[in-house]
Image (cartoon, coloured by chain):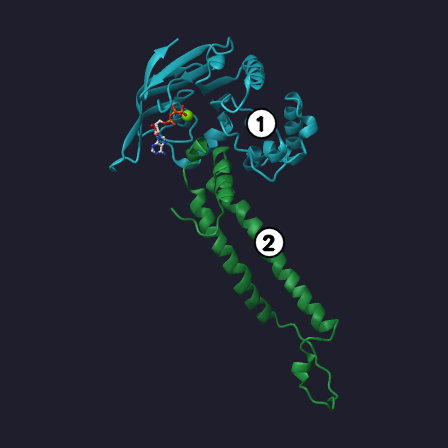
């Protein structure tokens, strides 16, 4: 369970271009649910995901993860929590060029220092489950958009995170591929993972996989269905 | 901010690694070994080439300079030696500055906030 209370986030605080992207978010996100953040451009969806996913610290307010207050922790601890608890699927996929699909999937596991052979097997298993086995040795820049996204999903899953965070996961996909993503999401939800995503896409928001839609506007919650 | 010595691609790569859970130290270690491997390879290649040149090919390039241009070829052999201190000095002035010149910008890129990668 993730609890946010009084979360505010400022950019360029104290400068002339100070901007409050989040203005007091109180939210409880239960485990094993698919929650979507929905709202106009600039409403704070990405910012909220970075705060929940320990990529950024809130300027004010508390983040509790499984009853542990993590908002005050130093960077190193946040990194450790992040890599054990969260898997990220970025809008631009953010794969590392020049490396193969398989190598990209294995990357988040290296700092954990497990056995290389076991790790490789796990990565191959994940790519296989996403129908990408045949492309595992291809360099990622040669892959199609849909293939790149599946590599990004496999990479997000390599450390077996409880929570998956996906920012605008269908923004770079056509209708058929978006449908494919929703099918994968269905499987992940059935595995009992908590999924947090942001989207403009009605196809995602109205999908039966999404159990809860939180509406944002100007850094505030304006609807919770 | 300006990072001397890192390409946009490298900065992006570092941002990605941080976002997927690498610590600043993990990134620097990896980049350090990468850089050390490159400069060490260059150093060793240079060393081996110089060694071969002197010991195997009797220093064909430098021999005339060392022995002089005398038409009457003097009858002496040049005895090649490997000077440990010189090698260490060379190492210090090639590998070490290279490592420093790469580590500092990497460190500066590696301490940036991992959330920047969410906004490619
Ligand atoms: N690093 C930053 N510096 C200054 N302002 C920022 C920064 N990051 C985000 N903002 C501002 O914060 C606000 C919220 O941004 P955010 O990216 O969270 O919106 P969003 O809901 O994800 O929008 P979109 O749908 O376009 O992705 C925006 O007005 C944005 O310009
Ligand atoms: Mg966004």
* Chain where mark 1 sits: A
Q: Are marks 1 and 2 in contact (CB under 8 Å)?
A: no
Ligand 1 is in which quadrant of the figure? top left
Q: Secondary structure at mark 1?
A: helix
* Chain where mark 2 sits: B
Chain A colour as displayed = cyan
Answer yes or no: are tags 1 and 2 on the same subunit: no
Seen from the viewer's position, the closer of residues A134 and A5 is A134
The circle on residue B38 is 2
Seen from the viewer's position, the closer of residues A200 and A65 is A200
State whether residue A166 is above or below residue A102: above
Binning the other alpha carbons within 10 Å of mark 1 as few (below 14), some (14 to 19) or many (20 upward) gives: some
The residue beneath circle 1 is A145
- In this rendering, position of residue A84 left or right of residue A52: right
Chain B colour as displayed = green
Binning the other alpha carbons within 10 Å of mark 2 as few (below 14), some (14 to 19) or many (20 upward) gives: some
Tag nearer the camera, 1 or 2: 1
State whether residue A64 is above or below residue B70: above
């Amino acid at each position: 369970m993730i609890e946010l209370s009084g979360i505010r986030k400022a950019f360029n605080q104290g400068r002339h271009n100070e901007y409050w992207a989040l203005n007091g978010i109180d939210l409880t996100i239960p485990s094993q649910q698919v929650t979507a953040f929905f709202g106009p451009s600039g409403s704070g969806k990405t910012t909220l995901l970075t705060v929940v996913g320990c990529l950024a610290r809130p300027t004010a307010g508390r983040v509790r993860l499984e009853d542990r207050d993590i908002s005050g922790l130093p960077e190193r601890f946040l990194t450790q929590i992040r890599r054990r608890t969260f898997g990220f699927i970025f809008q631009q996929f953010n794969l590392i060029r020049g490396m193969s699909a398989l190598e990209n999937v294995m990357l988040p596991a290296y700092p954990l220092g497990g056995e290389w052979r076991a790790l490789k097997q796990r990565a191959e298993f994940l790519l296989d489950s996403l129908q990408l086995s045949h492309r595992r040795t291809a360099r990622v820049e040669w892959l199609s958009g849909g293939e790149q996204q599946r590599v990004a999903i496999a990479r997000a899953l390599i450390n077996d995170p409880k929570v998956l965070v996906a920012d605008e996961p269908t923004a770079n996909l056509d209708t058929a591929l978006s449908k494919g993503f929703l099918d994968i999401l269905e499987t992940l939800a059935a595995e009992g993972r908590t999924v947090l995503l942001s989207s403009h896409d009605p196809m995602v928001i109205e999908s039966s996989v999404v159990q809860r839609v939180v509406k944002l506007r100007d850094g505030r919650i304006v609807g919770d269905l | 901010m300006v990072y001397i010595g890192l390409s946009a691609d490298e900065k992006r790569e570092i941002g990605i690694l941080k976002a997927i859970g690498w610590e600043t130290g993990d990134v620097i270690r990896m980049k350090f070994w990468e850089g050390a491997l490159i400069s060490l390879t260059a150093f060793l290649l240079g060393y081996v080439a110089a060694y071969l040149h002197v010991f195997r090919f009797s220093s064909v390039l430098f021999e005339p300079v060392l022995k002089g241009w005398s038409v009457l070829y003097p009858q002496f052999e040049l005895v090649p030696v490997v000077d440990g201190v010189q090698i260490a000095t060379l190492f210090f002035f090639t590998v070490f500055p290279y490592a420093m010149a790469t580590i500092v910008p990497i460190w500066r890129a590696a301490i940036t906030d991992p959330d920047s990668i969410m906004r490619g």
